[in-house]
Amino acid sequence: TRLGKILISVNPYKLYPIYTPDVVEKYQGARNTSSLPPHIYEVAKGAIEELIKTKHPQSILIAGESGSGKTEACKQCMQYLAEVAGSESDMERKLLDCSPILESLGNAQTV
């Protein structure tokens, strides 16, 4: 569910088809995402829109207990940002290349 700019999600411990290119397009093309189901792509889209609008750096905070799906949520944010950035600027590769580094930092904290 969503609470303003806050997304509250639960790790279902099973795969759902909610991270497909079609879903990326649905959120990317939406003028108003409040009519769509709450999704991590909505959070990533909001960060991009605020970055463009305010020209100020943005951050996305992903928090939760061990096993709650923080790493997966981070991966999905990075995937959305890479998809939106496109491969023309080489930004897609740069974003996806940093994912293992972010994951290792998260795992180091978990251990």
Image: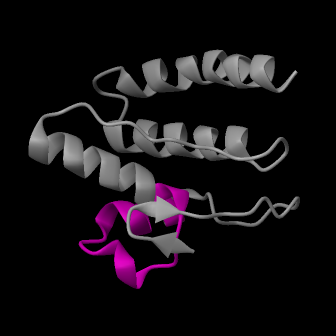
Task: Answer above or below: position of 31 versus 9.
Answer: below
x 71%, y 25%: residue: 106
Q: Residue at x 28, y 45 (%)?
A: 48
Magenta stretch: residue 62 in it? Answer: no
Task: Give coordinates of residue 27: x percent, y percent.
Answer: 40, 65
Which quadrant of the structure image shows residue 13? bottom right
Among all residues in the image, which is located at the extreme left?
Answer: 54
The one nearer the camera, 60 or 85, is 60
Instruction: Pick the quarter of the image with the N terminus.
Output: bottom right
- In the rendered view, tell whether residue 62 sits above or below residue 38: above
* Residue segment shown in magenta: 23-41
Which quadrant, please, contains the C terminus? Answer: top right
- Is 44 situated left or right of 52 in this image? right
For this view, does 97 lie left or right of residue 16? left
Viewer-side residue, 22 vs 63: 63
Q: Residue furthest bottom?
A: 35
Residue that appears at 55% across and 18% down: 98
- Determine whether 43 is above or below 110 in the image: below
